[in-house]
Image (tube, rainbow, N blue to C red):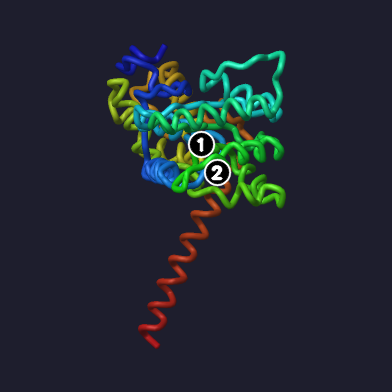
Amino acid sequence: MYLNYYGLTDNPFSIAPNPEYLFMSNRHQQALAHLNYGLHESGGFVMLTGEVGTGKTTVSRKLMQELSEDTQTAVILNPTLSALELLATVCDELGIQYDQSHASLKAFTDRILQRLANNHENGINTVLIIDEAQHLLPEVLEQLRLLTNLETNREKLLKVVLIGQPELQQLLRRNELRQLAQRITARYHLLPLTKEEVGQYVTHRLSVANGRQKLFSKAAIEHLFSISGGIPRVINLLCDRGLSLGYSLQRPFVDHRVMISASCQVLGHDIVTQRQQVGWKKHYIQAFLVCLAIGLVVGGFYA
């Protein structure tokens, strides 16, 4: 309802992963660079972790766009599978035919290894991308490691990209997975957006939707950062609700008060109050440290 009111041609804060709205912050660019580096190394695994909503899927989609044309990619979005089911899914993704009546770990493994060898002979790279990898069972991860055993004198024939929440890091510290952990050639933990990047993020998405870049006041952006913690998905939810509320109140832009009301509607009053208190405490601590440093400098000057 607010699109026409604010002169927007599209919903700039939809949580759908529209590549047209892709915003690659410095941290997202670093994450992408680490993944690309890992895929060009000789090892079998690269890993990207981050909290929910930080943009891991965005980075993975950008990675897929940048893969060379001579790459065959298999993507698994739901890894809550047994070892047998995972191998079957890999076969499906790579277009490998198999007899379901004779399905076994050995049968699937043999067919996958044959495809990897054929791809290598034909100059084709093979990449397996697994999202939500923190849900993988240890025995499934071990099966993946075994798939990467096929190699030439220079490189593995299968490269695996593991994408998941911080729990994935804890999972790979388990003793029985130490061999796999040693094969990770690049890893990156994606942090939320900084305060400056939150403003850039909002401006970018508004510009793509042909909207005015000043639809949110500076104070509203500051509140948005403190409440969202710099998580892009939460930013989208809050901004969308802020514009809806601003429209209902017939405001020309979203100010600080409108953003606070929108935050309470989306997250709940208790959570908003709690996060504001944490932000105030950090502000007071920083101010105290600055004053203390100035006092020490001044005291040293007159000593």
Compared to 122, does 155 lie above or below? below
**Horizontal relation, residue 198 to residue 272: left or right:** left
Where in the figure is residue 195, as x and y percent of width and height?
Answer: 41, 45
Q: Position of residue 170 (x, y in %)?
A: 66, 48
Which residue is painted at 47% across and 40% down in the image? 230
Left or right of 86 in this view: 220: left
Residues at marks 2 and 1, CA–CA distance in whole angstroms: 47 Å
Q: Amino acid at mark 1?
A: Leu
The quadrant of the image that shows the C terminus is bottom left
Q: Secondary structure at mark 1?
A: loop
Q: Which mark is residue 68?
A: none
Residue of label 1 = 158
Of 198 and 79, nearer the camera is: 79
At label 2, which amino acid type do we have? Gln
User: Can residue 196 be seen by looking at this rendering?
Assistant: no
Mark nearest the camera among 2 and 1 is: 1
Residue 170 visible, this angle: yes
Q: Secondary structure at mark 2?
A: helix
Classify 272 as above or below 34.
above
Q: Nearer the viewer, residue 177 or 155?
A: 155
Q: Mark 2 sits on what residue?
A: 276
Which of the marked residues, 2 or 1, is nearer the chain's N terminus? 1
**Which x, y percent locates residue 212?**
28, 25
Split into 4 quadrants, where in the image is the N terminus? top left
Question: In the image, is 271 to the left or to the right of 10?
Answer: right
Where on the picture, by quarter, is residue 121? top left
Disc 1 packing (10 Å; few <14; some 14–19; many ≥20): many
In the image, 208 versus 122, the foreground residue is: 122
Toward which corner of the image does residue 276 lie, by quadrant?
A: top right
